[in-house]
Image (cartoon, grey):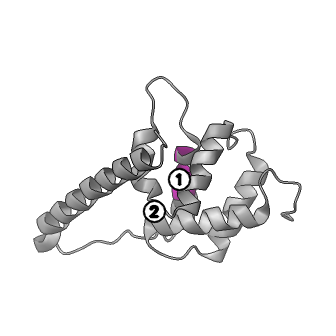
Amino acid sequence: MKIDGSLPGAPDELRKEAVFLYKAAFNKSIPDTLLERYLRAHADLTKQLEGAPFELQIVKTIIEKNLDPVGIEPWLRKKGRQHHLLTRKLLLLSFLNECGGNPAGISRSPDRFALPCMALTVCAAALALLRGRIQAARYGLV
């Protein structure tokens, strides 16, 4: 399938978006195969991946300002409403990454390190949420 300019959102913007969101979520460079799957999903799932203009602007602001999408995403959730566009994009990347057969960022540490690893993970998640809330408020995203 050829990705061309007829897609909603320019391919260069989608590539930049995929690279940025993947790096933020997995702290690694996006594999070429996963990038191609992300672009193909946008071509095939245009209805599911379209967002309101304000949602598109929020995603663009996060990318342009180099903000933390994983930390901001929980603050964009609203009870009783459809998932925010950023949530759908992060879920798509996670799904594509997991279906690729070699999920990034998943490893098993020896049991003696399980508790310290869990504690560090919880602290990192709390800091990401705090940083996300501060960034979301500072840039008027919520």
Magenta residues (range): 87-94
**Which image quarter: residue 50?**
top right
Q: Main secondary structure of the magenta part?
A: helix
Note whether 103 is above or below 85 in the view shown: below
Look at 12% across and 64% down and name the residue there.
115
Q: Position of residue 124 (x, y in %)?
A: 26, 61
Is 139 left, or right, of 128 in this rendering? right
Q: Is residue 114 magenta?
A: no
Q: Residue furthest top?
A: 80
Is mark 2 in CB contact (under 8 Å) with mark 1?
Answer: yes
Q: Which residue is mark 2?
A: 25
Looking at numbered disc 1 in the image, what kind of residue is underneath it? Answer: Leu
Q: Which residue is mark 1?
A: 90
Is 89 left, or right, of 134 in this rendering? right
At mark 1, the secondary structure is helix
**Which image quarter: residue 64?**
bottom right
Q: Position of residue 100 (x, y in %)?
A: 57, 66
Q: Position of residue 40 (x, y in %)?
A: 75, 59
Q: Nearer the viewer, residue 31 or 124?
A: 124
Look at 49% across and 43% down and name the residue there.
141
Q: Nearer the viewer, residue 101 or 142?
A: 142
Q: Position of residue 69 (x, y in %)?
A: 47, 55
Look at 50% across and 64% down and name the residue there.
66
At mark 2, the secondary structure is helix
